[in-house]
Every structure is written in structure tokens, then in C-alpha cells.
Amino acid sequence: MLPRLACSCLPAHLLLNRSRMLTPTVEVRTTADGSSTLYVPALDEHYHSTHGAIQEAQHVYLGAGLAPVMAAATGMVWVLEVGFGTGLNALLTLQYSLASPHPIFYDTIEKYPLPPAVIGQLGVERYVLNPELLDYHEQIHAAGWNTPVALTPQFALLKLAGELQHTPLAEDTYHVIYFDAFAPEKQPDMWTDEIFQQLYAATAPGGCLVSYCAKGSFKRSLQAAGWEVDRIPGPPGKREMTRAWKRA
């Protein structure tokens, strides 16, 4: 399987050595469900909800996004994640794919890839008790950047090191978008009208975008780009989350 980028060659700015990427200083924190997240002191921001990293991922990205799309799928499902982070969403999506008849191609974009030493400090063996999943966790992080790799017959991964704004995406491609950027007040350049226009163009008709964020300004930007926005219950600790559809 090949990635659905808009051209066959990656732009030069994506052909970066991981050692050259600038990663903010982070601290490992344990969330309420026992799973780990990272805290960025410079932003006063966590990578996941402190009420439970796994709970948030399962509720927002798999439950509200992937599950309804997979239920309606007739073939391969294309997922785009904005913000690879610790790889938790990728791991849980791979796990989901193992019991699905529809294969998943998972593209994920990360401006600041984490060094292996930080990944090792997450201590995933404390809360991922399935040895097979632990092995997949290692494979996800061992996979090279900017090179597609099939981790199972049902799950292929492409990790892109770079900025979403400068990543060419093929139109009408993705069935689900996990929008997992830092909060708008922490990373405002990721929450612009232009970003959501770019993602709308890249979404397949009938596809959706899901995010933990429920801010009114976010929803208005989505609507301005053409999305149809749902207000749905959020994960523990959040009253609402956002799901937006590109209607067929």
C-alpha cells in the first residue's frame, strides 16, 4: 500500500533527520486511568487529558470517529492523525484494526517527534498488559519517519515529520481525521480557517474529523470551511467534544 500524499515525492522540508527536530522539554505524568501522558512546562500543557489518556483516546478518536466510519466502510479506511505525540492513538487504532475486516492506512503528522529516551520513560508496560500490543508499540516507534510500513495485514503506518501546513494531502482521501493538536490558546497556528479548509479538502465525502476541543471559535472555523458540526458528549472531565462531517 502507498500513502495518499498529493505527490509521489515528499517535500524537502519533510526529509529531516529526527535528531535535527527540535522537541520541547517534557515531563512524564500519570493520568487518572493509570496511563501516561507528557507535560510541556513551556506551554503548561499536557499531551492528553489528565483524567485518563487512554479513556480520552478511546472516547474521542476511536468511539466518536473511527467506530462509526468502520461500521459503514466497504473497503480500506484511511486515517489522518494531526499530532502523533506518544503514539497512543496509533496503537489503539492498530488494536481496533485487528478485529476488523477493513484494513487501515494510518497517516500521522508530527512537528516535534519525541526521542526514544522519552518514549521509554512512558512505562507503557504498566498499563498495556497484552504482550502483542507491547510489541506493536515498539514497532510503531521503531518505524522510520516519512516511509510507509505495513505492521500487520490490517494496518499500515506512515509517520510524517513536519508541519501540517506544508504537507501536501491528496483530496477526498481520509475517512477519519484525528485532530489532536495542542489547545488553541497554546498552539493558535494549528486552529486557523486555512487549516480546516485544507483538512476538509483532504477528507473523503462522508468522512469526519474528531477532536477533544469544543470551543466555539473552533466550531465556527469548521463550519466556515464547509463541515457539518455535531455537539456530542466529551470524555471524563469534559462536557463536550467535537465531531464534524464532510457530507457526501
Image (spheres, rainbow, N blue to C red):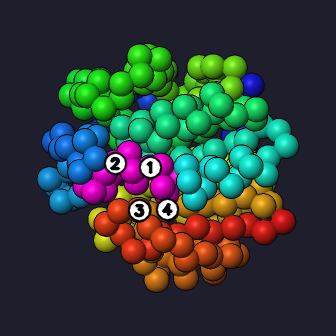
Q: Residue type at mark 2: give it.
A: Ala
Seen at 72% across and 58% down, the residue is 207
- Quadrant (top left, top right, bottom left, bottom right) of the N terminus: top right
Residue annotated with mark 3: 235
Q: Nearer the viewer, residue 27 or 36?
A: 36
Q: Is residue 137 above or below residue 215?
A: above
The Cα atoms of the two marked residues, 4 and 1, are separated by 10 Å
Q: Is residue 176 above or below residue 152?
A: below
* SS state under label 3: loop
Identify the magenta region. 47-61
Residue annotated with mark 1: 57
User: On residue 246, which mark appears?
Assistant: none
Tag nearer the camera, 2 or 4: 2
Disc 2 residue crowd, few under 14, some 14–19, many 20+, Cα 10 Å:
many
User: On residue 211, which mark appears?
Assistant: 4
Which numbered disc flags the more N-terminal residue, 2 or 3? Answer: 2
* SS state under label 2: helix
Disc 3 residue crowd, few under 14, some 14–19, many 20+, Cα 10 Å:
many
The answer to whether the residues at label 2 and label 1 have Cβ atoms under 8 Å apart is yes
Residue annotated with mark 2: 53
Is residue 125 at all visible to an observer of this figure?
A: yes
